[in-house]
Amino acid sequence: MDASRKFDQDTLYNLLPAVYRVRDVAEGQPLYALMGVIAEQVAILEEDLAQLYDDQFIETCADWVVPYIGDLLGVRGLHQIASQISPRAQVANALALRRRKGTAAMIEQLARDVTRWDAKAIEYFQQISTTQYLSHLRPQNHTVDLRNGKALQNINSAFDTLPHTAEIRSGGKYNLPNLGIFLWRVQPFSLTTVSPFSVDAQRYLFNPLGINTKLYNLPETEETITHLAERNNVPAPIALRHTTVALYYGEGKSIAIYVESDNGQDTIRELIPIDEIRFCNLADHNGTWANLPDEHYAIDPILGRLALPEPLPADSHLRVTFHYGFLADIGGGEYARNVTTPQDTVLVKATSIQQGFDDLGSQSGIIEVTGETFEEDLTIRLSAGQQIVLRSAENQRAFWKLSENLIIEGGDGASLTLDGLSIDGGRIADGLLADEGKLVIRGTIAELNIQDCTLVPGIRLNIDGSPLQPQTPSIVIESPQTSLKVSDSIVGAVRAGIDCQIEFKNSMIDATSPSSVAYAALDDFDPGGKFSSTNCTIIGKIHTTEIELASNTIFYAELVNGDTWLAPVWAERRQRGCVRFSYVPLTSRVPQRYQCHPIGADDLAYPHFRSLRYGSPFYAQLTPQCHPAIAQGADDEAEMGAFHDLFQPQRLTNLRTRLLEFMPFGMEPVILLAS
């Protein structure tokens, strides 16, 4: 509504005859106060009328109106499974989808709207090898051209264009009635203008952790519903061969490389021109990397490596922007964390971690750092009652590299929160590990909170991603009666005293092997303090005094020959607590189980993971062949484990439900998980 038509207190008062206003002023303006009360109610009515108008349109209506508009259009109801999956897009596109019912482009759009995953539809009857006849020549559907490297690179993928022999068997992919729908579950996550890991003056790894990392495409938005997805429209790994550099390199794209220098007053950051960039193979070869360049900057998107034609000047250094693949907003990342600063809270924005603690002193408050790489070793000392939050700025990810243990000492009632950080450590001297890089909590600190953080499992990683210190825990709590809370994070093993309280939520606790110790006392054998977990994937053995609650959790643990432990998951007190909707090894000693697997020796429900190596895009992801009792075994029929809140089974069920309405006559949908 036009602001000039609003009836505020003064507008209503000025509508009264002047004689009443004069008398009202003489009597202390009781009539003016009455107009204020009336104006408040008029404002409520105006707002309600404006919202009623907005509620007529799917783009502006309130959330509760969406199902009613959908009902008018006959849109089927689906699982309301997560806040990020809204039916608004489904209703908004309902008419457009029906006009294009049965087309591949429409099926793609439908899949994206329902699942919120990028999709690609393929009509397989067009890819079946056929006998040629003169009235319909299709030479590309007869034989495979072995000289077409680009086509061979895409074989059996969503972008396969080669002819295939028909698969008549049930479940075959290449068959006349099949319409394939590829879905990309792995999403691209950005690291923006970070410092790459330096191997030497001319060789770098994109990942600041110093590991090989596949570089992923940042999908370009499809502007029309009739557009069929191409490789640059989906979050797939960037291919090495037959790849157009311009599709992926540049400002706002998947990859960017900058040279940063300081002229004494300002920091100058310049993008390397695209004509100086080449994609090539930089794999290991004869003790170095193959194909080191002489003139251009060389990028290997498969290994996430960068080679320079010559060393940079002493006053310059590299910055890179790239995207890596992962399934969810778990661990340190540049995703939104809803960072807020309460009023009357001391906020220190620091250029180094040590400076932040120095500036804060003995006060309680928040230390905020940017998405830089910090190589600092320090001991954090908290005074009694002091409460400190150390966090990365919103949409940034700070890397903290330790060469020694991070010691956290606190007085009575002190607490520390780590938010949005990635921490790794471990120093090598003379070829041996001289120090470890774990968190050690001492004193009488009351609480340690770790949220949206990564404490690299195995402390530090080799270039291939294997853990350098697989038996070293990430967190050691030496202080008594400390509460540790870990949420939306990836951490290594934990050690804690018998009086401590441990709580994990939506996290991965990775001891790097199912036979290693994920949680126990300081001696790696005696029981640690009380333990609870919700929506977690725990890799390794557990020994605790008591499991208060374990829900929707995968305990991926096992005993090996000669093991001195009595059970892979071992709780001393089994009369209290509950383990529900979880995978627990059959020989475990835990409290009462409810709807857990395996039930007996004949139960084949067992978790199968695509990868258990941190840094892989498929880290802790259940395979499509995983038993439904695990993949749909949570209390709400989502999957067990750290990716519970993705609600992947419900997304696929929703898609199958909607496809019944839109599939072409005589064709069958084949849902394929591209990642």
Image (cartoon, rainbow, N blue to C red):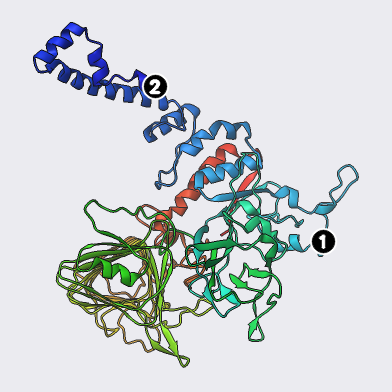
In-front residue for pair 19/577: 19
User: What amino acid type is highlighted by mark number 1?
Assistant: Asp
Question: In the rendered image, which quarter contains the N terminus?
Answer: top left
- Residue 528: % across, % down: 24, 77
**Vertical side of 577 occupied by 457: above or below:** below
Distance, label 2 to label 1, CA atoms, is 66 Å
Res 555 seen here = no
Give the residue at the far left of this rendering: 27
Question: Who's the residue at 54% across and 71% down the image?
Answer: 316
Question: Who's the residue at 58% across and 46% down the image?
Answer: 221
Sooner in the amino-acid sequence: mark 2 or mark 1 = 2
Give the residue at the far bottom of this rendering: 430
76 left or right, relative to 95: left
427 left or right, relative to 183: left
In-front residue for pair 442/326: 442
- Residue 214: % across, % down: 57, 67
Q: Which mark is residue 145?
A: 1
Question: Who's the residue at 79% across and 62% down the image?
Answer: 148
**Neighbours of disc 2 within 10 Å: few (<14), some (14-19), many (20+):** few
**Neighbours of disc 1 within 10 Å: few (<14), some (14-19), many (20+):** few
Q: Which residue is mark 2?
A: 2
Question: In the rendered image, which quarter contains the C terminus?
Answer: bottom right
